[in-house]
């Protein structure tokens, strides 16, 4: 008689995730890289952010109940001699995966601060924030008024400058040569900005 054995393999799964933000710039998919290290400090996975800033490491199976520790940190592609305009987040996260006898998992996170006392804080998840240093830029919006069949007088016509939300931000009159010079607009963040210039219609009674 041949005995048969049916083996049921119970195991647990855990996926470590995080988020990435870029202050002062537009985050692009694959722009930053992150490393997942085991308790021995061995790099076991690397992932980049998606366009929304999500970071998702590979799913890890667990076949035995216990406590498993990992470290997550951002990999500075520039190295120590960072000459880019991006300030990398130095945070290091200790991630603990607890697997109980029922193969249920729970994950806790500790963020290791950079304070002089090496203090750590318990957090809800992994979040890295990089900052882009941006040199302020400025533009001087200007238009020119042309009046046919008559002599243009200084201050004869009024023009308005609106932002992309249709908020009035400046009002100016023409000069004697027809130039309309608005105040300078300062930009300290990367992005696209839209403005509208309109002539104020004056009713003559």
Image (cartoon, rainbow, N blue to C red):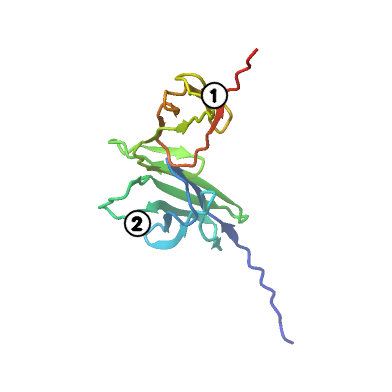
Estimate the x, y position of residue 44 in percent, counting from the top left.
43, 63
Q: Judge whether residue 181 can be spotted in this image.
A: no
Q: Is residue 2 above or below residue 135?
A: below
| Badge 1 density bin: few <14, some 14–19, many ≥20, Cα 10 Å | some
Estimate the x, y position of residue 151 in percent, counting from the top left.
48, 23
Q: Is residue 149 above or below residue 70?
A: above
Q: CA distance from mark 1 to mark 2?
A: 43 Å
Estimate the x, y position of residue 145 in percent, counting from the top left.
49, 29
The residue depicted at 63 percent of the width and 55 percent of the height is 102
* Left or right relative to 71: residue 105: right
The residue depicted at 38 percent of the width and 44 percent of the height is 91
Picture quadrant where residue 202 is located: top right
Assign the N terminus to one quadrant of the image: bottom right
Q: Observer-nearest residue: 70 or 67?
A: 70
Which of the two discs, 1 and 2, sits closer to the camera? 1
Furthest residue to the top?
Answer: 205
| Badge 2 density bin: few <14, some 14–19, many ≥20, Cα 10 Å | few
Q: Which mark is residue 168?
A: 1
């Amino acid at each position: 008689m041949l005995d048969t054995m049916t083996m049921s393999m119970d195991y647990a799964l855990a996926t470590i995730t995080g988020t990435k933000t870029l202050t002062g710039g537009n985050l692009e998919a694959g722009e930053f890289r992150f490393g997942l290290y085991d308790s021995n400090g061995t790099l076991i996975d690397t992932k980049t952010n998606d366009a929304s800033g999500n970071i998702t490491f590979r799913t890890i199976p667990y076949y035995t109940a216990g406590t498993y520790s990992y470290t997550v940190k951002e990999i500075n592609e520039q190295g120590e001699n960072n000459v880019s305009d991006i300030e990398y987040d130095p945070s290091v996260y200790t991630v603990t995966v607890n697997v109980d006898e029922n193969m249920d998992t729970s994950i806790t996170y500790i963020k290791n601060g950079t304070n002089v006392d090496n203090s750590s804080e318990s957090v809800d998840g992994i979040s890295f924030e990089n900052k882009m240093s941006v040199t302020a830029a400025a533009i001087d919006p200007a238009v020119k008024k042309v009046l046919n069949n008559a002599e243009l007088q200084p201050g004869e016509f009024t023009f308005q400058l609106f932002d992309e939300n249709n908020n009035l931000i400046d009002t100016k009159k023409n000069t004697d040569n027809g130039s309309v010079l608005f105040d300078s607009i300062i930009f300290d963040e990367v992005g696209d900005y839209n403005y509208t210039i309109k002539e104020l219609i004056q009713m003559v009674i």
